[in-house]
Image: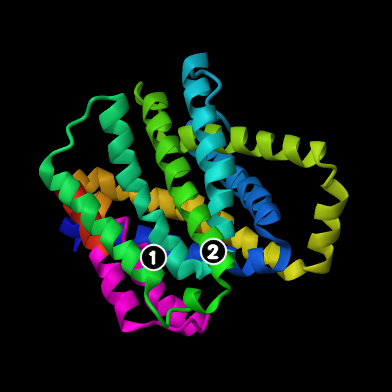
């Protein structure tokens, strides 16, 4: 069993992200995606600072250079403050099943950005993987009889648009974080910088929009949402990220990257049993096709 610790950790990562999507969707339906994003970042930052205190004896990596803080802060603002917000909006509008699948476009956009910015190779095999991923996602989004298809057309279109935006922002945030971690900074330390920057931007926006009172009143009216976000802040950014780090450490990068991208597969049974979402056989086939495309992209 110990020989497969990396592979197991990769599967745990995908499961954590899928479960996290359930909690976020339920919380966003109660208090909205904007408030859910703010509170989840707050709790995640608290957890990460405690972890940093435990392992690195400081809540934040104050000794890191300004350039590192700059890259990671920009990464946090783009990937967490805005990328996650668009993702949560997508969850509400098209459901976590389709929303999670749209997020599978993130590796595709990441590969394209790495090709444009860093000059990384984009072989025919990788292009084939991108085509497979796009084909699977298009199949699921437009399949008749899916849960998202039962929503108003305009509502569904906005949900898909937000899901694609989320994938772009998440991919951009990852590329920027790669720059910030080039000096060997711990992923937990790097993530705490990203969370802090995202939180500061979200708080500034909240103050400028004069939504402090509205946020507090909304949470008072929906106390169960707070419990959901406390759990979501730990499952996704902390437990999920930790498992992904363990996976990358003990398994080949291509294998680890593929196994940590299987959240849409886990979402099929979770969405059916927990959210009572209708699962069409074509949605299942399209999901597997999209994940296969991600596997081809990474394993090539």
Q: Locate the N terminus and report the quarter of the image it occupies.
A: bottom left
Q: Is residue 6 visible?
A: no
Observer-nearest residue: 205 or 186? 205
Badge 2: residue crowd in 10 Å (few <14, some 14–19, many ≥20) = many
Observer-nearest residue: 109 or 246? 109
Q: Residue at x 32, y 46 (%)?
A: 107
Q: Position of residue 139 (x, y in %)?
A: 32, 68
Q: Residue at x 66, y 46 (%)?
A: 42
Q: Position of residue 298 (x, y in %)?
A: 20, 47
Q: Residue at x 39, y 70 (%)?
A: 142
Q: Position of residue 205 (x, y in %)?
A: 73, 38
> What span is in magenta?
260-289
| Image-based side of 249 in relation to 104, left or right | left
Observer-nearest residue: 182 or 119? 119
Q: Residue at x 11, y 43 (%)?
A: 124
User: Please, which colouring scheme is shown?
Assistant: rainbow
Establish if 142 lies above or below 296: below
Task: Check if residue 272 falls in the magenta segment.
Answer: yes
Reading the image, the residue beneath label 2 is 91
Q: Position of residue 134 (x, y in %)?
A: 29, 57
Q: Secondary structure at mark 2?
A: helix
| Image-based side of 244 in relation to 22, left or right | left
Q: Main secondary structure of the magenta part?
A: helix
Establish if 152 lies above or below 161: below
Q: Is residue 154 visible?
A: yes
Q: Which mark is residue 62?
A: none
Q: Which mark is residue 15?
A: 1
Badge 1: residue crowd in 10 Å (few <14, some 14–19, many ≥20) = many
Observer-nearest residue: 297 or 267? 297
Q: Secondary structure at mark 1?
A: helix
């Amino acid at each position: 069993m110990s020989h497969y610790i990396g592979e197991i950790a990769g599967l745990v990562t995908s499961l954590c992200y899928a479960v996290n999507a359930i909690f976020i969707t339920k919380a966003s339906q109660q208090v909205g995606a904007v408030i859910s994003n703010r509170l989840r970042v707050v709790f995640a930052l608290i957890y990460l600072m405690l972890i940093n205190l435990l392992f690195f004896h400081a809540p934040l990596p104050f000794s890191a250079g300004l350039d590192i803080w700059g890259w990671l802060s920009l990464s946090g603002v783009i990937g967490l403050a805005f990328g996650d917000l668009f993702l949560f909006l997508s969850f509400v509008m098209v459901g976590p099943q389709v929303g999670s699948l749209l997020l599978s476009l993130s590796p595709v956009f990441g590969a394209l950005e790495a090709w444009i910015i860093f000059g990384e190779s984009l072989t025919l095999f990788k292009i084939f993987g991108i085509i497979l991923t796009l084909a699977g996602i298009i199949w699921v989004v437009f399949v008749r009889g899916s849960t998202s298809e039962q929503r108003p057309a305009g509502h569904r279109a906005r949900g898909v648009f937000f899901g694609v935006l989320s994938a772009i922002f998440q991919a951009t945030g990852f590329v920027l974080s790669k720059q910030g971690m080039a000096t060997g900074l711990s992923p937990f330390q790097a993530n705490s910088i990203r969370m802090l920057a995202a939180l500061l931007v979200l708080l500034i926006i909240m103050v400028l929009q004069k939504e402090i009172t509205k946020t507090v009143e909304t949470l008072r009216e929906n106390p169960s949402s707070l419990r959901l976000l406390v759990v979501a802040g730990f499952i996704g950014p902390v437990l999920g990220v930790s498992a992904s780090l363990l996976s990358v450490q003990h398994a080949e990068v291509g294998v680890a990257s593929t196994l940590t991208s299987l959240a849409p597969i886990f979402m099929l049974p979770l969405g059916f049993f927990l959210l009572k979402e209708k699962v069409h056989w074509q949605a299942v086939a399209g999901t597997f096709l999209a994940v296969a495309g991600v596997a081809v992209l990474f394993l090539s």
